[in-house]
Amino acid sequence: MDLGQYILGFLLKNRYCYLPGIGNIDIVKQDANAAERYAFRFTPIGTIEDDFAAYIATINNFSIAKAANLIRDYCQEMKGHLQAGETYTIDQVGTLTLVNGRTQFQPVDNFRFDKIYQPGKMIQLQFKEAEHKEDDQKPKESYYVKTKPDRNTPLNTANLIRAGVLLGLVAVLGIGGYLSYRFYKQYTENKQVQEQQSLNSNVLPADSLPPADTTVTPVAPPVTATTLNVVLQQYNDLPAASKRYNQLKSFGNEITLTTKDSVQYSIEMNLPATILADSVKVLDSLKKQFNPKGTVFIRR
């Protein structure tokens, strides 16, 4: 497989090409006074790396290791020709000879890199058909090398499309985040309103409460020999008397709310007359239960 056909393409793309055991070929920019702005330069040393092997492997669709082995064989073959006193030619690049044990390089005449190299453009290189058996059915027609654009090269359409797509994604994400925030805020507010309405529905309105029992029972008839009326509490205000009466009544006490002159109201309890035998204890017990700070007495 003749690898010489790949050297120029790699040089145009990277401006250098290292050949193991031979040396390094560069494309350098010359002095402004020189006839040609660019020229080939050869040095017998270089840095070992896999860029050239990767370049060849990509073109031929095989592994970098295989390309590296082909480069090694190619350079050994070149060295054999040189040691035999022969001149070795690299197509469209130059010739190599061995003089007094040192490799001499003669570049091609009239190399116009500034004509071949156009920033941002595609360079089409025609390659010969590969000579290895695996690729007999796959003739190589052409390979395109993307050159590095100058800094002053304007943005192309592809870059503008990428920038537009990126800005569109950022805008979509921003709008989506804003709508999500609005939805969450509205959901929270609705939930708070529903909770407040639920609390309000459990509170009975004031006009739905049962009215207080303000019925005033007429003065009981004179106590018979078998019962006595015990005054538990007295009020000069009917609403206060009614409130206390309803409270005690709700506890299951058998009591009455009475008045003589509609000025003073009494809450009374009807008890058997037998309490007279131990009235002090009975009245003291009723006082502790119903009127600790007031007076409990038997109405005569």
Image: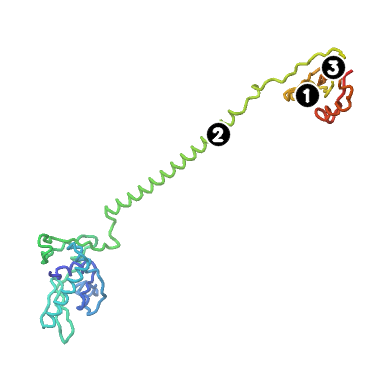
Quadrant housing residue 6: bottom left
Q: Residue at x 22, y 79 (%)?
A: 43
Q: Residues within 10 Å of mark 2 (few under 14, many from 20)?
A: few
* Mark 2 or mark 3, earlier in chain: 2
Mark 1 — residue?
240
Q: Quadrant of the C terminus?
A: top right
- Give x and y (percent) for residue 187: 49, 37
Q: CA distance from mark 2 to mark 3?
A: 57 Å
Q: Secondary structure at mark 3?
A: strand
- Give x and y (percent) for residue 229: 84, 19
Q: Which amino acid type corresponds to the residue marked 1 in the rendered image?
A: Ala
- Give x and y (percent) for residue 59: 18, 63
The correct choice, above or below, for 266 with respect to 81 in the image is above
Q: Secondary structure at mark 2?
A: helix
Q: Residues within 10 Å of mark 1 (few under 14, many from 20)?
A: few
Mark 3 — residue?
227
Q: Are marks 2 and 3 in contact (CB under 8 Å)?
A: no
Could you say which disc has been placed on residue 195 in the image? 2
Q: Secondary structure at mark 1?
A: helix
Could you say which disc has been placed on residue 126 in the image? none
The correct choice, above or below, for 300 with respect to 201 in the image is above
Q: Quadrant of the N terminus?
A: bottom left
Q: Which amino acid type corresponds to the residue marked 3 in the rendered image?
A: Thr
* Mark 1 or mark 3, earlier in chain: 3
Q: Are marks 1 and 3 in contact (CB under 8 Å)?
A: no
Q: Which amino acid type corresponds to the residue marked 2 in the rendered image?
A: Glu
Q: Residue at x 15, y 79 (%)?
A: 79
